[in-house]
Amino acid sequence: MAYYIEKFLLEDSLIREEMRFNQDGVMAPLRGIIQTFTHRNFNNLPGPFRENNHRWGDYGLALSPLAATWAMKAFGVKSRSTTRRMLTANGMALGLTVGLTQMLKWSVSETRPDGSNDNSFPSMHASLAFMGATVLSREYGHISPWITIGGYSAATGTQLLRIRHNAHWMNDIFMGAGIGVVSTHLAYFLTDRIFGKDGIRRMTFSPSELAQLDAWNYHPSGFRLVSGTETNGRSLDIADFAELVDESLDLKDITLRSSASITSGFEAEWFLTDKVFLSAIGRYTLSQAKLQIPDPSITAWGEQIHIYHGDIAAGWETPIVKGIRIGARTLWGVRYNEGVTFRRVAEDMQLGEPLLHIKPQLRPAGGAGIVIDMLQSHNQTVGFTIDYLHTFNTHFLPNRWVIASSWKAMF
């Protein structure tokens, strides 16, 4: 009897907690605002990006989390909300997301990297993708943390596609993500004020799950999705890592300017004890780059820098308050950057002759950082990772800070 009373009280308290305003993602719009100011000079540098015609196809990936939510509902999978509540919350989230995004597009009038129009800031694709991922997590994340990870993986993939297709600047996709997440949480909060507790599915837990939810020390081995920003020195003397193709230029006079990067990847964590863990980490990083050339008659097309990381980490993590753990780790591995060729912008705005080539490099890397995990359910955490990484034996972006959000499914 004591178990069932405890179970009822905990489930009731979880519903009350669910109805509060969810603050996950409130820092995302701030990231977009900061990058808007720090990237302004980069965005205005000469050096257009080539137009890519794949942008409408990106909506398929962007809308897939929201489509998955309603497909599961149509097939009878039990969601957090009744159909009426879900329609209300989703309609409100869609209205807030589209309205705020479009209002900023009209107000800011930022030119896209490919120069096709002035609707760059913020990204509507990113806004809709993260709105859908947040809806999917709110409605079905209680079934499995992999549903949440899948939704946010699709949303992060949308961000990467928008950059790869030269449709957006970095600040556009981060601001869009922030609008999507915060608008959705606000919509659910307002919907809960309208309907109250009626129509919210009461969660059920086994005795072991119940104990984990109420524990200070949970065993957080698991699989983590990370998505965030990698910052670095954005103005680089390229003489040490580039090959000149156009002999009329001098490498010493040319500077590489890069944006902050979007980075995403997966981490597998295994806790040897309740506090000591090992991790295997794989990440992909994408940034935009331009060349500054003293001769004003020569302009190079903007290009993208692709970097791949593979690391092994060892660390220590401990609870600081109930349900929240914080730890430190050290990372060691390798970094590989693809080669990239910068070409002249021809007089007819076509792809011109090569100017210089950045060499591909495989180099050892190491660093240290902190990990913060916050328990969301008996098998899921959300949190942050902040790492400083150094790549050895290179002058090409050797020092970087990586600040990322994380969603972890626990084994």
Image (cartoon, grey):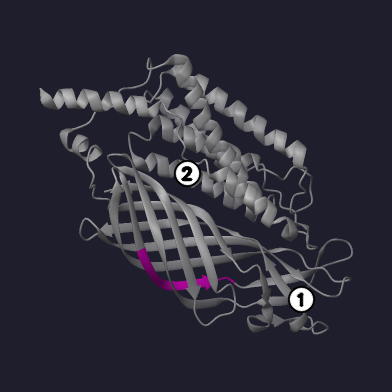
Residue 409 image point, x, y percent? 33, 46
Residue 172 image point, x, y percent? 66, 47
Between label 2 and label 1, give the one nearer the viewer.
2
User: SS class of the residue under badge 2?
Assistant: helix
Q: Residue at x 72, y 45 (%)?
A: 120
* SS majority, magenta: strand
Q: Is residue 3 left or right of residue 390?
A: left
Q: Residue at x 42, y 35 (%)?
A: 137
Residue 370 visible in the current orientation? yes
Q: Is residue 185 left or right of residue 204?
A: right
Q: Which residue is mark 2?
A: 152
Residue 140 picture quarter? top left
- Name the mark on residue 254: none
Pick the front one: 72 or 19: 19
Q: Residue at x 45, y 34 (%)?
A: 22
Q: Note whether 72 is above or below 368 in the view shown.
A: above
- Name the mark on residue 355: 1
Disc 1 crowd rating (10 Å Cα; few below 14, some 14-19, many 20+) is many
Pick the front one: 337 or 175: 175
Query: How many numbered circles are shown?
Result: 2
Residue 319 image point, x, y percent? 28, 50
User: SS class of the residue under badge 1?
Assistant: strand
Disc 2 crowd rating (10 Å Cα; few below 14, some 14-19, many 20+) is many
Pick the front one: 335 or 184: 184
Q: Residue at x 67, y 45 (%)?
A: 55
Q: Amino acid at mark 1?
A: Leu
Boundaries of the magenta span: 329-338
Residue 15 image point, x, y percent? 34, 25
Q: Is residue 393 left or right of residue 143?
A: right
In the picture as drawn, the residue positioned furthest to the front comes out as 321
